[in-house]
Amino acid sequence: MTADHTADHTADAPGARTAVVTGAASPRGIGRATALLLASQGWNIGILDIDAVGGKALAEEIAANHNVTAYAVTADVSNEAQVRTAIDELEAALPPLAALANIAGVSSPVPYLELTSDEWHRVINTNLNGVHYVTRRVAESMVRHNYGRIVSISSTSAQRGGGTYSKTPYSVAKAGVIGLTRALARELGPFGITVNAIAPGPINTDIMGGPLTPETRADLIDTLLVNRVGETHDVASAIAYLLSNQSTYITGQTLNVDGGLYMH
Ligand code: NAD
Protein backbone atom coordinates (compact mmCIF):
# COMPACT_ATOMS: atom_id res chain seq x y z
CA MET A 1 0.00 0.00 0.00
CA THR A 2 1.22 3.53 -0.70
CA ALA A 3 0.05 6.80 0.75
CA ASP A 4 0.66 10.43 -0.13
CA HIS A 5 2.63 11.76 2.85
CA THR A 6 2.33 15.33 1.58
CA ALA A 7 -1.45 15.38 1.60
CA ASP A 8 -3.22 16.24 4.81
CA HIS A 9 -6.58 14.77 4.01
CA THR A 10 -8.11 16.11 7.21
CA ALA A 11 -6.97 19.71 6.80
CA ASP A 12 -9.27 20.87 4.04
CA ALA A 13 -11.02 23.33 6.36
CA PRO A 14 -9.44 25.49 9.08
CA GLY A 15 -9.59 23.86 12.45
CA ALA A 16 -10.25 20.44 10.95
CA ARG A 17 -7.33 18.69 12.66
CA THR A 18 -6.51 17.71 16.22
CA ALA A 19 -3.10 17.29 17.83
CA VAL A 20 -3.01 15.06 20.92
CA VAL A 21 -0.43 16.28 23.44
CA THR A 22 0.43 14.12 26.45
CA GLY A 23 2.11 15.60 29.51
CA ALA A 24 0.82 19.13 28.86
CA ALA A 25 -0.49 19.95 32.34
CA SER A 26 2.80 20.90 33.99
CA PRO A 27 2.85 24.71 34.42
CA ARG A 28 6.49 25.16 33.26
CA GLY A 29 6.74 22.06 31.09
CA ILE A 30 7.54 21.23 27.46
CA GLY A 31 4.03 19.84 26.91
CA ARG A 32 2.31 23.08 27.86
CA ALA A 33 4.58 25.12 25.57
CA THR A 34 3.89 22.65 22.77
CA ALA A 35 0.11 22.68 23.22
CA LEU A 36 0.04 26.49 23.22
CA LEU A 37 2.26 26.75 20.12
CA LEU A 38 0.21 24.18 18.21
CA ALA A 39 -3.02 25.96 19.18
CA SER A 40 -1.56 29.25 17.89
CA GLN A 41 -0.95 27.45 14.59
CA GLY A 42 -4.61 26.40 14.33
CA TRP A 43 -4.49 22.86 15.70
CA ASN A 44 -7.34 21.73 17.92
CA ILE A 45 -5.77 20.30 21.04
CA GLY A 46 -6.45 17.08 22.93
CA ILE A 47 -4.62 17.06 26.26
CA LEU A 48 -3.89 13.78 28.04
CA ASP A 49 -2.27 14.02 31.46
CA ILE A 50 -2.39 12.34 34.85
CA ASP A 51 -2.91 15.81 36.37
CA ALA A 52 -6.65 16.43 35.92
CA VAL A 53 -6.68 19.97 37.33
CA GLY A 54 -3.70 21.18 35.29
CA GLY A 55 -5.00 19.59 32.08
CA LYS A 56 -8.44 21.14 32.42
CA ALA A 57 -6.98 24.57 33.22
CA LEU A 58 -4.80 24.46 30.11
CA ALA A 59 -7.75 23.41 27.91
CA GLU A 60 -9.74 26.38 29.22
CA GLU A 61 -6.80 28.74 28.67
CA ILE A 62 -6.35 27.53 25.08
CA ALA A 63 -10.06 27.80 24.28
CA ALA A 64 -10.13 31.34 25.72
CA ASN A 65 -7.11 32.59 23.77
CA HIS A 66 -7.11 30.69 20.49
CA ASN A 67 -9.81 30.08 17.92
CA VAL A 68 -9.63 26.30 18.32
CA THR A 69 -11.26 23.57 20.38
CA ALA A 70 -9.35 22.14 23.32
CA TYR A 71 -10.37 19.18 25.45
CA ALA A 72 -8.57 17.52 28.34
CA VAL A 73 -8.75 13.93 29.51
CA THR A 74 -7.16 12.40 32.58
CA ALA A 75 -5.16 9.18 32.31
CA ASP A 76 -1.99 7.53 33.53
CA VAL A 77 -0.05 6.74 30.35
CA SER A 78 1.34 3.60 31.99
CA ASN A 79 -2.18 2.16 32.25
CA GLU A 80 -3.26 0.90 28.83
CA ALA A 81 -6.96 0.63 29.71
CA GLN A 82 -7.03 4.23 30.96
CA VAL A 83 -5.21 5.40 27.84
CA ARG A 84 -7.64 3.68 25.49
CA THR A 85 -10.68 5.10 27.30
CA ALA A 86 -9.13 8.58 27.31
CA ILE A 87 -8.29 8.57 23.60
CA ASP A 88 -11.79 7.26 22.81
CA GLU A 89 -13.12 10.31 24.67
CA LEU A 90 -10.82 12.71 22.80
CA GLU A 91 -11.79 11.17 19.48
CA ALA A 92 -15.49 11.60 20.25
CA ALA A 93 -15.03 15.24 21.34
CA LEU A 94 -12.65 16.59 18.70
CA PRO A 95 -11.95 16.66 14.93
CA PRO A 96 -9.83 13.80 13.50
CA LEU A 97 -6.66 12.97 15.41
CA ALA A 98 -3.93 13.87 12.90
CA ALA A 99 -0.93 14.51 15.17
CA LEU A 100 0.46 13.11 18.39
CA ALA A 101 3.15 14.56 20.66
CA ASN A 102 4.23 11.99 23.29
CA ILE A 103 5.64 14.27 25.99
CA ALA A 104 4.48 12.79 29.33
CA GLY A 105 7.43 11.48 31.30
CA VAL A 106 9.04 11.17 34.71
CA SER A 107 12.64 11.59 35.86
CA SER A 108 14.63 9.26 38.09
CA PRO A 109 17.95 10.30 39.66
CA VAL A 110 18.32 7.07 41.69
CA PRO A 111 21.79 5.43 41.26
CA TYR A 112 21.65 1.94 39.78
CA LEU A 113 22.96 0.19 42.90
CA GLU A 114 20.20 1.82 44.97
CA LEU A 115 17.44 1.12 42.45
CA THR A 116 14.38 -0.88 43.48
CA SER A 117 12.35 -2.95 41.05
CA ASP A 118 9.39 -0.67 41.68
CA GLU A 119 11.39 2.36 40.57
CA TRP A 120 12.67 0.55 37.48
CA HIS A 121 9.14 -0.42 36.46
CA ARG A 122 7.70 3.04 37.24
CA VAL A 123 10.14 4.70 34.87
CA ILE A 124 9.96 2.11 32.09
CA ASN A 125 6.17 1.85 32.33
CA THR A 126 5.71 5.62 32.10
CA ASN A 127 8.47 6.68 29.71
CA LEU A 128 8.44 3.72 27.29
CA ASN A 129 5.29 1.63 27.70
CA GLY A 130 3.28 4.84 28.03
CA VAL A 131 4.52 6.07 24.65
CA HIS A 132 3.58 2.70 23.14
CA TYR A 133 0.07 2.62 24.67
CA VAL A 134 -0.80 6.14 23.51
CA THR A 135 0.79 5.71 20.09
CA ARG A 136 -0.90 2.37 19.47
CA ARG A 137 -4.37 3.77 20.16
CA VAL A 138 -3.87 7.04 18.26
CA ALA A 139 -2.31 5.20 15.30
CA GLU A 140 -5.49 3.15 14.99
CA SER A 141 -7.33 6.43 14.33
CA MET A 142 -4.65 7.85 12.01
CA VAL A 143 -4.65 4.75 9.83
CA ARG A 144 -8.35 5.29 9.11
CA HIS A 145 -7.50 8.73 7.60
CA ASN A 146 -4.31 7.53 5.90
CA TYR A 147 -2.50 10.43 7.52
CA GLY A 148 -0.59 11.06 10.72
CA ARG A 149 2.34 12.81 12.37
CA ILE A 150 3.85 11.33 15.53
CA VAL A 151 6.68 12.85 17.61
CA SER A 152 7.92 11.30 20.85
CA ILE A 153 10.27 12.85 23.36
CA SER A 154 13.44 10.86 23.99
CA SER A 155 16.47 12.48 25.66
CA THR A 156 20.21 12.93 25.23
CA SER A 157 20.29 10.53 28.21
CA ALA A 158 19.42 7.78 25.72
CA GLN A 159 22.53 8.58 23.68
CA ARG A 160 24.96 9.43 26.48
CA GLY A 161 23.83 6.92 29.15
CA GLY A 162 22.43 9.61 31.44
CA GLY A 163 24.88 12.28 32.51
CA THR A 164 22.54 15.17 33.27
CA TYR A 165 20.06 14.24 36.01
CA SER A 166 18.19 10.99 35.48
CA LYS A 167 19.96 7.68 35.51
CA THR A 168 19.75 4.12 34.17
CA PRO A 169 16.03 3.26 33.78
CA TYR A 170 15.41 6.71 32.29
CA SER A 171 18.23 6.20 29.75
CA VAL A 172 16.89 2.75 28.91
CA ALA A 173 13.32 3.97 28.44
CA LYS A 174 14.40 6.93 26.32
CA ALA A 175 16.62 4.67 24.18
CA GLY A 176 13.57 2.46 23.76
CA VAL A 177 11.65 5.46 22.44
CA ILE A 178 14.23 5.84 19.67
CA GLY A 179 13.90 2.16 18.73
CA LEU A 180 10.12 2.39 18.82
CA THR A 181 10.27 5.47 16.60
CA ARG A 182 12.40 3.77 13.95
CA ALA A 183 10.30 0.60 13.94
CA LEU A 184 7.02 2.51 13.71
CA ALA A 185 8.38 4.73 10.93
CA ARG A 186 8.75 1.52 8.91
CA GLU A 187 5.44 -0.03 9.89
CA LEU A 188 3.26 3.06 9.74
CA GLY A 189 4.87 4.79 6.74
CA PRO A 190 2.66 2.91 4.29
CA PHE A 191 -0.35 4.48 6.02
CA GLY A 192 0.82 8.05 5.44
CA ILE A 193 2.17 8.39 8.98
CA THR A 194 5.58 9.86 9.81
CA VAL A 195 7.17 8.98 13.16
CA ASN A 196 10.06 10.92 14.66
CA ALA A 197 11.70 11.52 18.03
CA ILE A 198 13.28 14.53 19.65
CA ALA A 199 16.17 14.18 22.09
CA PRO A 200 16.33 17.29 24.25
CA GLY A 201 19.34 18.20 26.33
CA PRO A 202 18.80 20.11 29.58
CA ILE A 203 15.65 22.22 29.35
CA ASN A 204 14.54 24.76 31.96
CA THR A 205 11.52 22.95 33.47
CA ASP A 206 10.78 21.47 36.90
CA ILE A 207 11.56 17.85 35.93
CA MET A 208 15.00 17.95 37.58
CA GLY A 209 13.36 18.36 40.99
CA GLY A 210 12.28 22.02 40.67
CA PRO A 211 13.66 25.24 39.18
CA LEU A 212 17.37 25.17 38.28
CA THR A 213 19.63 26.74 40.88
CA PRO A 214 22.28 29.18 39.57
CA GLU A 215 24.93 26.55 40.34
CA THR A 216 23.09 23.77 38.46
CA ARG A 217 22.49 26.09 35.53
CA ALA A 218 26.19 27.05 35.37
CA ASP A 219 27.25 23.38 35.57
CA LEU A 220 24.89 22.47 32.73
CA ILE A 221 26.04 25.38 30.55
CA ASP A 222 29.64 24.18 30.95
CA THR A 223 28.67 21.00 29.05
CA LEU A 224 26.97 22.83 26.15
CA LEU A 225 28.18 24.53 22.96
CA VAL A 226 25.74 27.41 23.36
CA ASN A 227 25.87 29.73 26.33
CA ARG A 228 22.47 28.91 27.78
CA VAL A 229 20.23 26.10 28.98
CA GLY A 230 17.36 25.17 26.65
CA GLU A 231 13.89 26.64 27.11
CA THR A 232 10.58 24.90 26.50
CA HIS A 233 9.99 26.87 23.29
CA ASP A 234 13.18 25.34 21.82
CA VAL A 235 11.61 21.88 22.02
CA ALA A 236 8.05 23.02 21.22
CA SER A 237 9.12 24.63 17.94
CA ALA A 238 10.97 21.47 16.87
CA ILE A 239 7.89 19.38 17.69
CA ALA A 240 5.61 21.75 15.76
CA TYR A 241 7.91 21.51 12.74
CA LEU A 242 7.88 17.71 12.78
CA LEU A 243 4.08 17.70 13.12
CA SER A 244 3.67 20.12 10.21
CA ASN A 245 3.55 19.55 6.48
CA GLN A 246 6.97 21.20 6.19
CA SER A 247 8.59 17.92 7.26
CA THR A 248 6.91 15.32 5.04
CA TYR A 249 10.23 13.77 3.92
CA ILE A 250 11.49 13.22 7.46
CA THR A 251 10.64 9.98 9.26
CA GLY A 252 12.36 7.57 11.61
CA GLN A 253 14.72 10.33 12.79
CA THR A 254 15.84 11.59 16.17
CA LEU A 255 16.37 15.34 16.24
CA ASN A 256 18.71 16.51 18.99
CA VAL A 257 17.59 19.78 20.59
CA ASP A 258 20.43 19.97 23.06
CA GLY A 259 22.74 22.94 22.54
CA GLY A 260 25.36 20.64 21.03
CA LEU A 261 25.59 18.33 24.05
CA TYR A 262 25.67 15.21 21.87
CA MET A 263 26.95 15.02 18.29
CA HIS A 264 26.92 11.84 16.24
P1 NAD B 1 7.43 18.11 33.54
O1 NAD B 1 7.63 17.33 34.79
O2 NAD B 1 7.33 19.59 33.62
O3 NAD B 1 6.15 17.56 32.77
C1 NAD B 1 5.84 16.19 32.71
C2 NAD B 1 4.35 16.05 32.44
O4 NAD B 1 4.05 14.66 32.28
C3 NAD B 1 3.46 16.59 33.56
O5 NAD B 1 2.39 17.33 33.03
C4 NAD B 1 2.98 15.32 34.26
O6 NAD B 1 1.73 15.47 34.93
C5 NAD B 1 2.90 14.36 33.09
N1 NAD B 1 2.97 12.96 33.51
C6 NAD B 1 3.90 12.39 34.33
N2 NAD B 1 3.61 11.10 34.53
C7 NAD B 1 2.49 10.83 33.82
C8 NAD B 1 1.70 9.67 33.62
N3 NAD B 1 2.03 8.50 34.20
N4 NAD B 1 0.61 9.76 32.83
C9 NAD B 1 0.27 10.93 32.25
N5 NAD B 1 0.96 12.08 32.41
C10 NAD B 1 2.07 12.02 33.18
O7 NAD B 1 8.65 17.68 32.61
P2 NAD B 1 9.25 18.29 31.24
O8 NAD B 1 10.62 18.71 31.54
O9 NAD B 1 8.30 19.18 30.57
O10 NAD B 1 9.39 16.93 30.41
C11 NAD B 1 8.59 16.58 29.33
C12 NAD B 1 9.24 15.43 28.61
O11 NAD B 1 10.53 15.84 28.13
C13 NAD B 1 9.50 14.19 29.46
O12 NAD B 1 9.24 13.03 28.69
C14 NAD B 1 10.96 14.28 29.80
O13 NAD B 1 11.52 13.02 30.09
C15 NAD B 1 11.51 14.89 28.52
N6 NAD B 1 12.79 15.55 28.66
C16 NAD B 1 12.94 16.64 29.47
C17 NAD B 1 14.18 17.23 29.56
C18 NAD B 1 14.41 18.43 30.46
O14 NAD B 1 15.57 18.79 30.70
N7 NAD B 1 13.37 19.07 30.96
C19 NAD B 1 15.27 16.74 28.85
C20 NAD B 1 15.08 15.64 28.02
C21 NAD B 1 13.84 15.05 27.93
Image: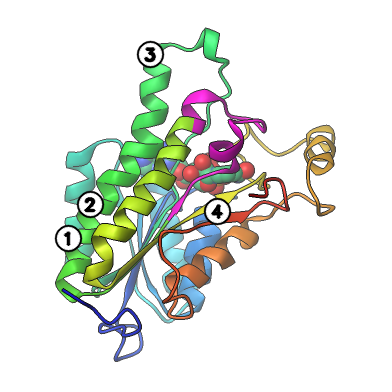
In the image, what residue occupies the spot 37% across and 38% down? 128
Which x, y percent locates residue 138?
24, 59
The front one of 174 and 106 is: 174
Q: Earlier in the sequence, mark 4 or mark 3?
A: 4
Identify whether 68 is placed above or below 183.
Answer: below
The front one of 93 and 65 is: 93
Q: Tell me the distance, in whole angstroms, between the alpha carbons under discs 1 and 4.
A: 26 Å
What SS does tag 4 mark?
helix
Which x, y percent locates residue 164?
67, 33
Which x, y percent locates residue 101?
41, 58
- Tag 4 residue: 30
- Tag 3 residue: 117
What SS does tag 1 mark?
helix
Q: Amino acid at mark 1?
A: Glu
- Tag 1 residue: 140
- Give the residues in magenta: 152-171
Quick check: is 132 in the magenta stretch?
Answer: no
Q: Tell me the distance, in whole angstroms, between the alpha carbons under discs 1 and 3.
A: 32 Å
Tell me if label 3 and label 2 are in contact, CB under 8 Å.
no
